[in-house]
């Protein structure tokens, strides 16, 4: 028996600096293998020391006499070289990721603290059983969390409520062209703000949708109501005809005056007017559907398509029902519609200074003509004939005229205009 073999048979372990490996009783995490898994013909001390890939005494490569169960230290093997060898995710920790008891390779779940260093969730390995902290796309890497609310168009979804548009179709959030289109697609959608993108619009924007009143599907385009005169949206305000927005994020039923992108880009076949007292209250707005239509937008109807007025025939009771019960209107003329102005309705009328006019609504007179009206009901009103009836240019409400004009109370309201 050679001296070397005799020494190996004694079962005497060398110290940490020894060349032959750990004592047979160790089986610790430093060696990477449990002695119970080694072949019976091989002394446990023939396995590799974690710091020495070769036996310093024999000069033989340590893997030669043993089987594939022997595990080299992580520092001696590139993590990409062998998918079955599990290395520490940091690339060189003296404590391998192998199970110290079984000596099994990287198919055993990794220690959660070590695996986390490589960016992997504890317990996850790739198909080959290895974890490489620098790798991208291992099966063990969890996908980013899915969007769960206010998700933009194109984002994966499982329900309508996850989408800013309120519409999930084909498992993808999708913008509709208007509140009416959304109401058709998702009849159960509640009133609220949704992302819409009308045909031809370069991008989506937020709009408030009334999904319950008058059949639902109404897109809010404008909110108007200013204490005092003239109002922000009186007849002469540039907001009626320009493209400037006002408080576009106020997509709700608050009393914050606003002009939305929807005013400029949503076509419609009907307008819904609503009014409430100017001071915020819990009173439900009065409502008046108005038969107006435009294939482009309300801005187009008011500023381009009908600069010389569009006439409606709802009648005085309908318009009076929109404003306060205290409102009054003069008995004659009673012109109504869009851009209601004496010079737009009657060829005999000249540009009479101070005559009442209104962007959407009705005007009336105490005289039996329409050239010098003193009262109005509606949105974008104007009356500045201060010498007779007192000035009252309101964003929303009614001007009844003074008693001298045989009118009645002036009422300032807060109004909402919807289209559908």
Image (tube, grey):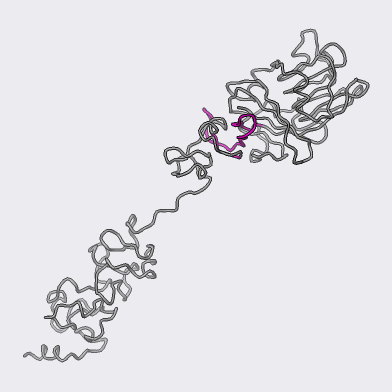
In the picture as drawn, the residue positioned furthest to the left comes out as: 1
Question: Is 352 displayed left or right of 23 in the figure?
Answer: right
The span shown in magenta is 192-221
- Name the image quarter holding the C terminus: top right
Residue 114, x across and y down, in percent: 37, 70
Choose top left, top right, bottom left or bottom right for residue 244: top right
Choose top left, top right, bottom left or bottom right for residue 356: top right
Question: Is 369 displayed left or right of 274 in the figure?
Answer: right
Q: What is the count of numbered marks?
A: 0
- Vertical side of 121 occupied by 341: above or below: above
Residue 342, x across and y down, in percent: 78, 15
Question: What residue is drawn where x is 72% and y is 39%?
Answer: 256
- Name the image quarter holding the N terminus: bottom left
In the picture as drawn, the residue positioned furthest to the right comes out as: 404
The verdict on residue 200 being magenta is yes
Choose top left, top right, bottom left or bottom right for residue 157: top left
Residue 168, x across and y down, in percent: 47, 39
The verdict on residue 120 being magenta is no
Residue 234, x across and y down, in percent: 76, 28
Who is closer to the viewer here, 367 or 340?
367
Question: What residue is drawn where x is 25% and y is 89%?
Answer: 15
Question: What residue is drawn where x is 70% and y is 28%?
Answer: 273
């Amino acid at each position: 028996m050679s001296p070397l073999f005799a020494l190996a048979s004694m079962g005497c372990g060398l110290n940490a600096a020894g060349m032959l490996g750990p004592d047979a009783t160790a089986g610790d995490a430093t060696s990477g293998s449990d002695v119970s898994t080694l072949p019976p013909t091989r002394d446990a001390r023939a396995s590799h020391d974690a710091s020495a890939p070769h036996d310093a005494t024999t000069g033989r490569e340590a893997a030669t006499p043993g089987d594939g169960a022997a595990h080299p230290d992580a520092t001696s093997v590139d993590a990409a070289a062998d998918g079955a060898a599990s290395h520490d995710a940091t690339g060189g920790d003296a404590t391998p990721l192998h199970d110290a008891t079984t000596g099994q390779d990287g198919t055993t779940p990794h220690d959660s603290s070590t695996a986390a260093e490589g960016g992997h969730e504890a317990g996850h390995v790739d198909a080959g059983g290895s974890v490489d902290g620098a790798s991208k796309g291992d099966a063990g890497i969890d996908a980013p969390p899915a969007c769960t609310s206010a998700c933009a168009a194109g984002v994966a979804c499982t329900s309508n409520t996850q989408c800013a548009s309120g519409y999930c179709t084909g498992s993808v959030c999708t913008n509709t062209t208007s509140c009416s289109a959304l109401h058709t697609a998702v009849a159960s959608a509640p009133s609220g703000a949704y992302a819409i993108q009308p045909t031809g619009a370069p991008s989506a924007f937020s709009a408030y949708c009334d999904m319950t009143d008058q059949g639902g599907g109404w897109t809010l385009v404008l909110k108007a109501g200013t204490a005092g005169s003239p109002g922000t949206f009186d007849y002469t305000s540039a907001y009626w005809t320009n493209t400037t927005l006002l408080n576009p994020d106020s997509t709700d039923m608050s009393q914050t005056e606003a002009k939305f992108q929807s005013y400029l880009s949503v076509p419609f076949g009907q307008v819904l007017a609503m009014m409430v007292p100017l001071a915020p209250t819990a009173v439900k707005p009065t409502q008046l559907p108005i038969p107006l239509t435009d294939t482009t937008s309300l801005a187009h109807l008011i500023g381009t398509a009908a600069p010389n007025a569009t006439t409606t025939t709802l009648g005085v009771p309908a318009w009076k029902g929109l404003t306060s019960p205290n409102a009054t209107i003069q008995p004659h003329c009673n012109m109504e519609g869009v851009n209601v102005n004496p010079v737009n309705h009657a060829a005999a009328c000249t540009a009479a200074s101070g005559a009442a006019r209104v962007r959407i609504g009705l005007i009336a007179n105490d005289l039996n003509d329409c050239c010098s009206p003193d009262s109005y009901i509606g949105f974008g009103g104007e009356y500045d004939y201060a010498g007779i009836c007192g000035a009252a240019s309101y964003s929303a409400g009614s001007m009844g005229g003074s008693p001298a004009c045989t009118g009645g109370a002036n009422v300032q309201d807060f109004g909402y205009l919807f289209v559908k």
